[in-house]
């Protein structure tokens, strides 16, 4: 029997695993374990997403909700609740202490000022002006705590023509206002009506991606502000509008219009800025095919055995393939060819072509389209620990996406999934304000907490 030789990269992979294996995260220090974060998110997952990133890095994150809980606790497909909490919030309640505080009451706002005096970061998602009217905006709180980093995530920002609107930040509005949604979705073919093809409209991206983007930029802004504070001792205000943050992902489409006056119109599964670039059917589902270079497009044509028939040798530029009529023509020609294979077979053909094909090592990118179930069963992600269940003392064994990056010294981690409304009132109010059970009962009876 031939001796099996381990590839060289396997030893390197073993070495990296020994340094940043997620299974060893709890043996290592946390990067932000000396920080106190107040999360006042209201009706918005953007702020919750932002504070989740900080909480994963070890910040003592205190989630402040109104008595009865914030509306985001109810966000859940089909209204499904797990032990009183929506599925979406189980993902973004991680590692946070949960307390209640009624900011509509004067005493509640005074308590917040005391908490802000001991905090490093405050995150809020109220419509612009609400916190200022309550006397707990940045100017007021920075007088009490000049080191405070005050982060506002809103629908239209803290200045600008629409900043005075009292509209909460909604993800679907942010997607629409960003300009990105304009270029996504199926086209309405000539001669068809929307009654016949109701789906041929601009299409939103997955679950609240605009909120996730503004929350991510919020966390990045906070980390930059913390670095600046280390140098100067000064806090600052951070202002994020979710549509503006999501626009950052528009990439070349903005420059295409600014430089050439070209609008990136929606074109269904195709894209007139790129070729080969789209999703195509297979026997068991579909695959994404990516070329981006003429040689990669030619390689794909070779993979499916159409190199000579389609005259690929004569192609000298991708420019013709950027035209809508050409893309529609070749899409119709490609579909029957990809349907001859399963997704796995087509992926394997691309990998093999990179080794032995006429244009090797050039090949086409091929990736199977997988369902959430298949993604969660994928051995790659299971081995990297992203779907390892969290054993939560309140909610039980919960599968939620673990921290999305690995680190050798201060890795992020999920310590617990979530907490019920007001679960940590006793601990947090005693720790920071010295409130015992008697005082907490008084505040509860008065509707303050």
Image (tube, rainbow, N blue to C red):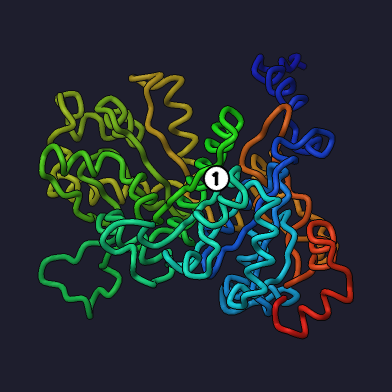
Q: Residue at x 78, y 55 (%)?
A: 416
Residue 178 visible in the snapshot: yes
User: Where's residue 358, x and y in %?
Assistant: 34, 19
Location of residue 227 by image quarter = top right
* On screen, residue 436 above or below 307: below
Q: Position of residue 315 (x, y in %)?
A: 16, 27
Q: Residue at x 69, y 66 (%)?
A: 111
Image vertical order of residue 73 relative to residue 219, above or below: below
Give the labeled residue for mark 1: 219
Name the quadrant containing residue 444: bottom right
Q: Is disc 1 placed on a helix, strand or loop?
A: helix
The answer to whether 12 appears left or right of 184 in the picture is right
Left or right of residue 168, residue 441 in this image: right
When the figure is inspected, residue 54 is found, relative to residue 80, above or below; the finding is: above
Is 146 on the left or on the right of 340, as rendered? right
Q: Nearer the viewer, residue 67 or 79?
A: 67
- Taking depth in this image into account, of 349 and 137 the one nearest to the observer is 137
Residue 339 visible, this angle: no
């Amino acid at each position: 029997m031939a001796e099996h030789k381990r590839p060289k990269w396997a030893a390197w992979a073993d070495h990296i695993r020994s340094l940043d294996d997620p299974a060893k995260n709890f043996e290592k220090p946390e990067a932000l374990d000396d920080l106190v974060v107040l999360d006042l998110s209201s009706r918005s997952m953007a702020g919750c997403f932002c504070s989740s990133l900080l909480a994963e890095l070890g910040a003592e994150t205190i989630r402040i909700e109104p008595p009865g809980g914030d509306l985001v606790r109810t966000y859940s497909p089909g209204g499904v609740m797990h032990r009183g909490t929506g599925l979406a919030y189980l993902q973004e309640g991680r590692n946070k202490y949960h307390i209640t505080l009624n900011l509509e009451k004067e005493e509640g706002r005074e308590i917040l000022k005391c908490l802000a005096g001991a905090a490093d970061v405050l995150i809020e998602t109220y419509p612009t002006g609400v916190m200022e009217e309550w006397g707990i905006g940045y100017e007021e709180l920075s007088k009490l705590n000049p080191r405070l980093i005050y982060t506002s995530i809103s629908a239209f920002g803290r200045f600008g023509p629409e900043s005075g609107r009292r509209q909460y930040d909604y993800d679907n509005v942010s997607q629409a206002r960003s300009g990105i949604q304009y270029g996504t979705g199926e086209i309405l073919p000539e001669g068809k009506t929307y009654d016949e093809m109701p789906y041929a409209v601009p299409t939103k991206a997955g679950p609240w991606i605009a909120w996730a983007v503004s929350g991510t930029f919020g966390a990045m802004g906070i980390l930059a502000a913390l670095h600046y504070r280390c140098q100067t001792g000064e806090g600052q205000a951070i202002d994020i509008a979710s549509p503006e943050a999501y626009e950052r992902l528009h990439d070349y489409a903005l420059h295409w219009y600014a430089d050439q006056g070209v609008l990136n119109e929606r074109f269904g599964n195709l894209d007139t800025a790129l070729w080969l670039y789209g999703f195509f059917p297979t026997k068991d589902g579909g695959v994404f095919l990516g070329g981006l270079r003429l040689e990669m497009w030619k390689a794909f044509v070779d993979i499916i055995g159409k190199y000579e028939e389609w005259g690929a040798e004569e192609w000298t530029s991708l420019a013709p393939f950027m035209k809508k009529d050409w893309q529609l023509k070749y899409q119709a020609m490609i579909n029957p060819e990809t349907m001859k294979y399963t997704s796995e077979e087509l992926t394997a053909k691309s990998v093999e072509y990179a080794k032995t094909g006429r244009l090797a090592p050039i090949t086409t990118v091929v990736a199977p389209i997988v369902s959430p179930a298949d993604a969660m069963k994928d051995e790659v992600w299971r081995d990297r620990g992203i779907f390892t269940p969290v054993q939560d003392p309140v909610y039980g064994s919960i599968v939620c996406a673990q921290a999305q990056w690995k680190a050798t010294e201060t890795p992020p981690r999920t310590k617990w999934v979530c907490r019920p409304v007001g679960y940590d009132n006793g601990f947090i109010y005693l720790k920071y304000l010295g409130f015992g059970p008697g005082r907490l009962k008084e505040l509860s009876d008065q509707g303050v907490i």
